[in-house]
Amino acid sequence: MTATNSDTLWTRAFVLLCIVQFLGYAQHAMLSPALPLYVTQLGGSPFIVGVVLFCFAATSVLIRPAVGHWADRWSETGVMISGLLFQGVTIFFCLIPLAEAAMLANGLRGIGWAALNTGGYSLLARTAPETRRGEASGYYSGVQSASNIFFPALALWLVAASWGGFGLVFTATALFSLAGALAGCAVARQTPPVAHRRSRDDSKWWREFFRFVEPEILLPSGLLFWLNITWPAVINFIVLYAGTIGIENLGAYFVISGATSLLARPLLGGASDRIGRGVCVALGFALQMCALVLVVMVTTLTGIMSSGALYMLGNAIGSSATLALAMERADPERRGKAMATFSLSYPLAYGVGSLFIGAMVEAAGYATMFLALAALEAGGLLFALTRRGRMK
């Protein structure tokens, strides 16, 4: 699976890579509604829920430079498979009925998440045709988000079933990770070995290892962070918010929002190839801002589903554009580190957002929290509009 000038996108390697990402993200999708409910059942407050989610993000961010280094010096596919196996094993710490154990499990799971995404993005950057990077980003991220259609609802159903429970959810997520690792082995067979990529000065390898930021990726990384800092509100905390307004079964919300994301990413991913990355990023911020305002204005399941669909539409077009921009700017000699820098934006946003949202809910309530997040999105919109010239 080497870089090529061919415009062929749907190679066997690309299809297998998408399958791996779908299975890897299935675990995360099931845990998105299950972990907040599990922690509150153990007696945790919304802030403690935020801390548990932050642990996942913190380790995922801190380990990225090391994971990127291993991807460049060892194997992008090997890093991806190792991450899936690590996620599958460490989730079982959640079987210990303590909030602290959930923090530990989620923190360890973040290490596997870093490897899954760094390896996957690096492989995508190698295989995507130069003229179809926006389209490739749309399909790739669409496959990742497709897990949100069914698996959050499945998790809620398993938790509520008389024969189910949280233990069954955790076991199911481990099986998805194992299946993803097996699919990753098929990707490895489609990936020809590459020459060992040496640093420009291998005598200073430790500087490469501890180089946390790739400067050329800062702009798309910052934009991805800004786009996703509100993500925990609509994926994790929305379950708790729905309960406060009398909506008990939120499975349909995840189906609708997940389906919107699945359809929007491949359909709109190529838009940035035609109308420009900057325009698409600005549109993403605008749609997410409207969604966060809408969610505090409605009190029905239909209204919340409409808000979720609108948010996913914005996230789809904005995230696909930033991914395409990152692939364009990545140095081929340091692709693993570059994509590690880019991919750490999501967990960093997830962690910071989770803590901020949990604290806001306890201090001022859900409505104020959603409006504060809408204000953040408005700031992102203004920033994107003023930086359009740098995103062509």
Image (tube, rainbow, N blue to C red):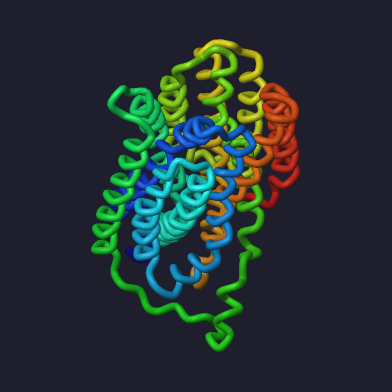
| Quarter containing the N terminus | bottom left
Q: Is residue 47 above or below residue 158?
A: below
| Residue 313 on image: x %, y % | 52, 30
Q: Residue at x 61, y 24 (%)?
A: 291
Quarter of the image holding residue 135?
top left
Q: Is residue 306 above or below residue 385?
A: above
Q: Residue at x 66, y 51 (%)?
A: 222
Q: Residue at x 36, y 41 (%)?
A: 170
Give left or right: position of 190 versus 52: left
| Residue 339 on image: x %, y % | 52, 60
| Residue 302 on image: x %, y % | 50, 13
Give left or right: position of 203 versus 85: right
Quarter of the image holding residue 353?
top right
Seen from the viewer's position, the closer of residues 30 and 46 is 46
Seen from the viewer's position, the closer of residues 291 and 131 is 291
Q: Is residue 168 visible?
A: yes
| Residue 98 on image: x %, y % | 49, 42
Q: Residue at x 59, y 32 (%)?
A: 233
Q: Is residue 350 visible?
A: no
Q: Is residue 310 above or below residue 268?
A: above
